[in-house]
Image (cartoon, grey):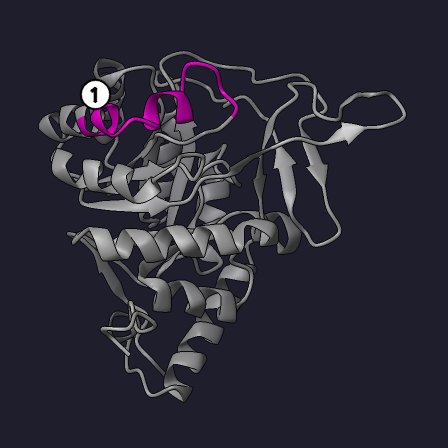
Amino acid sequence: MADLAVRVGTLALRNPFLLASGIWGESGESLAGAWAAGAGGVITKSIGSEPRKGYPNPTIETYPDGSLLNAMGLPNPGIDEYPREVEVARARGATVIGSVFGADAAEFARLATRLAASGIAALELNLSCPHAEGYGTEVGSDPADVEEIVRAVVREVRIPVIAKITPNSPDPAALAAAAERGGAAAVSAINTVRGLAIDTSLRRPVLAHGMGGLSGPAIKPVGLACVWQIYDRVAIPVIGVGGIATAEDALEYVFAGARALEVGTAVTQSGVAVFGRLAEGLSRRLDELGYSSVAAAVGAAHPARA
């Protein structure tokens, strides 16, 4: 069977499948559960400076294909409390990647320093949440801002920094290039796609917040396109995100240029057992196609690699 171990910069992963931020990551026990089920690493909830309750219900709309539209509002216990959860997951052997969100470079740097002290293996910067005012996409849509934020964090921490790129931009690859200039060890693409659902009986948006972020199978083509473009634009590794539920989905992302993969919505559908199935399935498919490892297959669909 093909070797699934990968490296994202200096970050070593036992397989490429990461629990995506915002899914199953509220507690250290849930992170540890995803790790025990076979995830190659687990990404925490996005953590901010202060506790946030998030938006009122309803916060999620589901679709027949398994896609989700959500506007949670970045609920989290805050940076003073969350490191305790990291300790729980690390005590169970998990490779933990922290996620933080902030309003500007200084806040990102402060949060990164605090969370890095908890012993996380890497740090993902949420520059791409599409529905939280003052955060995410609002601070991550301008290449100059992305470069400034990444550079500020890289100056303060000694672990790999991953910039999570928004698809809600005219040129996501330019944002990835800016992250690379700022010193990012990798970029992850994509976060959710901005969307809306209308309740026609009530004549108002379904979600209490109105706009939300679409995830799951519906956004896989968008994620693949962004990974494809980013792979051609930067030298640092790309982590693919968006609609990965099967080994074939994962293989598409690897061939498009992804070295690692985040899985989120599929966990809400199938539970954390999905990680073991994905790892086994991807290893088998790579072996069938003559690849000895994930690394050997990265970017294989690009013309120069075909």
Quarter occupied by residue 79: top left
Instruction: Say whether residue 262 is visible.
Output: no
Percent position of residue 62, x then y: 72, 41
Query: Could you tell me which residue is drawn at 38 percent across and 86 percent down?
Result: 289
Mark 1: which secondary structure? helix
Pick the quarter of the image with the C terminus. Answer: bottom left
Q: Nearer the viewer, residue 270 or 248?
A: 248
In this rendering, the count of numbered labels is 1
Assess whether residue 136 is covered by the magenta stretch. yes
Query: Could you tell me which residue is drawn at 48 percent across and 22 percent down?
Result: 76
Q: Is residue 31 above or below residue 279?
A: above
Percent position of residue 128, x then y: 40, 31
Residue at the limit of the structure toward the right, as seen here: 201
Stretch in magenta: 131-147
Which residue lies under the disc numbered 1? 109
Query: Could you tell me which residue is drawn at 34 percent across and 41 percent down?
Result: 172
Residue at the limit of the structure toward the front, as seen here: 170
Q: Is residue 229 left or right of residue 282?
A: left
Q: Is residue 131 above or below residue 247?
A: above
Instruction: Say whether residue 154 is visible.
Output: yes
Q: Nearer the viewer, residue 84 or 95?
A: 95
Residue at the limit of the structure toward the top, as seen here: 50
Q: Is residue 160 above or below residue 75?
A: below
Query: Could you tell me which residue is drawn at 35 percent across and 54 percent down?
Result: 227
Percent position of residue 125, x then y: 31, 32
Q: Is residue 306 above or below residue 211?
A: below
Q: Nearer the viewer, residue 46 or 84?
A: 46
Percent position of residue 110, x then y: 22, 17
Q: Amino acid at mark 1?
A: Ala
